[in-house]
Image (spheres, rainbow, N blue to C red):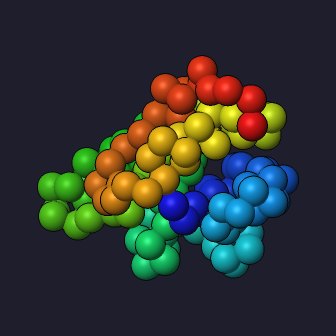
Amino acid sequence: MKLYLDEHLSPLLARMLRNRGIDCLTTIEAGNLGQSDEDQLTYAVGQGRVLLTFDREDFLALAAQWAERGHPHAGLILSRQGSTSELLRPLLHLIALRGKEDLHNHILWLQNYKDAPRP
């Protein structure tokens, strides 16, 4: 699974994921800081990356609009806001369980993976 972290997520999370061998790119690293949600999702699709974001309502609405137009996305992981340490464990659990799947047009809720073993 290749990840793209929305601009509100810490670059520290990306470093921690990379240290575990996970392909991860931040909005800042991609030069997309301040771009619209649609531009962020378009970029993620072009890169074949699943987008991780705290903007749950905005991206749910955007995914619905894209579905109506028959426009696919590479996958979304939606999360409540939390610290890097609060996000790391469920994210690693999600990747362990679903990382080899094709997540095109799937929307996953990170909190569904919170009961994970320690990394």
Residue 81 visible at all? no
Residue drawn at point x = 62 percent, y = 41 percent? 91
Please tell me how many numbered marks the rendered image carries: 0
Q: Quadrant of residue 35?
A: bottom right
Q: Is residue 102 left or right of residue 43?
A: left
> Quarter of the image containing the C terminus?
top right
The picture places residue 84, in percent across and down from the top left corner, at 79, 40
Question: Vertical placement of 112 versus 91: above or below?
Answer: above
Between 110 and 41, the one nearer to me in the picture: 110
Q: Residue at x 45, y 64 (%)?
A: 41
4 to the left or right of 86? left
Which residue is most to the top? 115
Query: Which residue is located at x 54 percent, y 29 percent?
Result: 113
Tell me: 66 left or right of 87.
Answer: left
Q: Quadrant of residue 100?
A: bottom left
Asked whether residue 16 is in view, the answer is yes
Counting from the top left corner in percent of width and height, residue 52 is at: 56, 50
Q: Position of residue 86 (x, y in %)?
A: 74, 30
- Looking at this view, is 60 or 35 the one in front? 60
Q: Residue 101: x and y, percent?
A: 37, 55
Rendering quarter of residue 22? bottom right
